[in-house]
Image: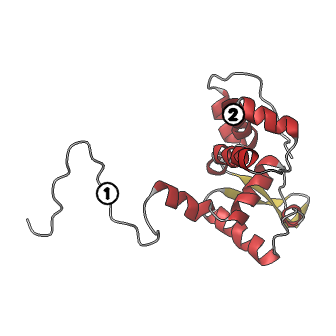
Amino acid sequence: MRGEAPPAKPGLVKKPLPDKAHRSLCPINLTLEKVGDSWSMLIIRDLMLRGHTGYQAFLRSEEKIATNILADRLARLEQNGVIIKKPDPADARKFIYSLTEKGADLAPLLVELALYSLKHERRTDMPKDVAAEMQRNKTAFVSRLVRACAPKTTAKRRKQEPRQGAEETLSLF
């Protein structure tokens, strides 16, 4: 029996060996490796909450991301399946970026980050009505946000599922 793993104990999850492409297979680590740096999360925020879809719009964000970092993060997010880019029909030299279903599923994480900041930071720059709505009914807020930024094909599939309230377009910041 040399070289074989001992039989797993009942009720325990068998730990696979770490993938050489990842630091570990911890679910938190795996997510952070894909979207965990601040620039990636700010790009996702701009796509999800501010309606930015173009390279120049991302550059105009108040955090002042450098062009080389923006290009790198956009490529990385696309490679990881969080965003997609398509040629701009109005100008073939430009691209339009949008969230995939995988990217839209980050809505709860962004809402939690915002709520954490609202609780622990003295000053934040978020419209008071949006903050109040987020705090009042986080679950409904997240559901509307996911529906608003999910790809159209996903939105159609989700439309068949029972929902509470009318579908809305969110423009938060």
Q: Give, as a three-letter code, the residue at label 1.
A: Lys
Q: Nearer the viewer, residue 12 or 90?
A: 12
> What residue do we see at 15% from left, 64% from top?
4
Q: Label 2 is placed on what type of residue?
A: Lys
Residue at 81% from the left image edge and 70% from the top image edge:
65
Task: Indicate the secondary structure of the residue bearing disc 2.
Answer: helix
**Which numbered dot is residue 138?**
2
- Which mark, by number, is residue 15? 1
Q: Position of residue 111 (x, y in %)?
A: 70, 44
In the displayed structure, 158 sits above or below 43; it is above
Q: Are marks 2 and 1 in contact (CB under 8 Å)?
A: no
Label 2, residues with CA under 10 Å away: few <14, some 14-19, many ≥20: some
Q: Hey, which residue is sitting farthest left in the picture?
A: 1
- Figure quadrant of residue 59: bottom right
Q: Earlier in the sequence, mark 2 or mark 1?
A: 1
Q: Is residue 23 left or right of residue 2?
A: right
Quadrant of the snapshot with the N terminus: bottom left
Left or right of 101 in this view: 96: right
Task: Give the image quarter of residue 64.
Answer: bottom right
Mark 2–mark 1 distance (CA, rounded to whole Å): 34 Å
Label ID, residue 65: none
Residue in view at x 66 percent, y 51 percent: 103
Which residue is farthest front? 122
On screen, residue 100 above or below 33:
above
The residue at the point 33 percent across, 65 percent down is 17
Residue 31 vertical placement versus 137 (above, below): below
Which element type, helix, strand or loop, lies under badge 1?
loop
Crowd tier of the residue under label 1, counting other residues whose Cα lies within 10 Å: few below 14, some 14–19, many 20 or above: few
Observer-nearest residue: 17 or 131? Answer: 131
Image side of residue 5 versus residue 59, left or right: left
Most extreme residue toward the bottom is 68
Query: What x and y, as percent, mark residue 110?
Result: 69, 48
